[in-house]
Image: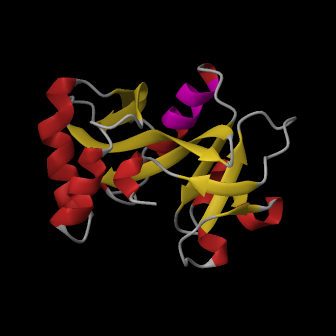
Amino acid sequence: MSMRTDWITRAETGADIPAIREIDLAAFDTPLEADLVEALRTDTAWIDGLSLVVTDQHGTVVGHALMTRCHIDDTPALCLGPVAVLPEYQNTGAGSAAIRAALDAAGKRGERFVTVLGHPPYYPRFGFTRASAHGIRITLDVPDEAMMALALDAALPLPSGTVRYAAPFGI
């Protein structure tokens, strides 16, 4: 498949849960990782309206992005959590559509900061920069370039401190 721009994004509904489970099982290496994603839907990290699905023109859910609550020290922020796309739809723009929709929804809700632990070549296109450059740390041993942060309002400086994630992440 080639890059598409006609993806439809919308807030997740309860009816989407089986499709999201199928996506997670196909996209993540182990069922344990898929279970972790699902745990975020039942914890206090869940924020209604900040879990977005991507559908094709027929309404088939092919991907999703999930934002959960985290903190940078005491400053509330969001974590762009799992972004997953069915393998046959990867590299088609579905993941990018999900991320853009999630960031847009967060901005409309007045959220100010987002962190992501992700692939360095991928996230800078959405405005993420290396978190350590702003004094943002994580308690996990990860490559420095993998932890990124974004201020949804470019006029706001990113806070510094240690990122605390939702309980299901175990950190």
From the top left corner, tell me how far across and down residue 84 is, in percent.
33, 53
User: Residue at left 20%, top 64%?
Assistant: 32
Task: Decide whether residue 106 is among the magenta residues.
Answer: yes
* Chief SS of the magenta region: helix
Task: Judge from the rendering whether residue 150 lies leftward or rightward of residue 17; answer left or right.
Answer: right
Position of residue 31 relative to residue 36, above or below, is below
Q: Quadrant of residue 57?
A: top left
Q: Nearer the viewer, residue 169 or 151?
A: 169
Q: Is residue 124 left or right of residue 47?
A: right
Pick the residue in front: 150 or 77: 77
**What's drawn in magenta, residue-wise?**
101-107
Taking the image as shown, residue 11 lies to the left or right of residue 15, namely right
At x 53%, y 62%, the residue is 117
Please name whichever residue, 119 or 2, is drawn nearer the observer in this view of the structure. 119
| Residue 50, percent from left and from top | 44, 30
x and y percent of residue 156 in the render?
84, 37
Image: 83 above or below 65: below
Task: Please provide percent x and percent y for residue 109.
Answer: 59, 20
Location of the N terminus (image quadrant): bottom left
Residue 93 visible in the picture: no
Please name the residue shown 34% across and 42% down the image.
64
Residue at left 33%, top 35%?
53
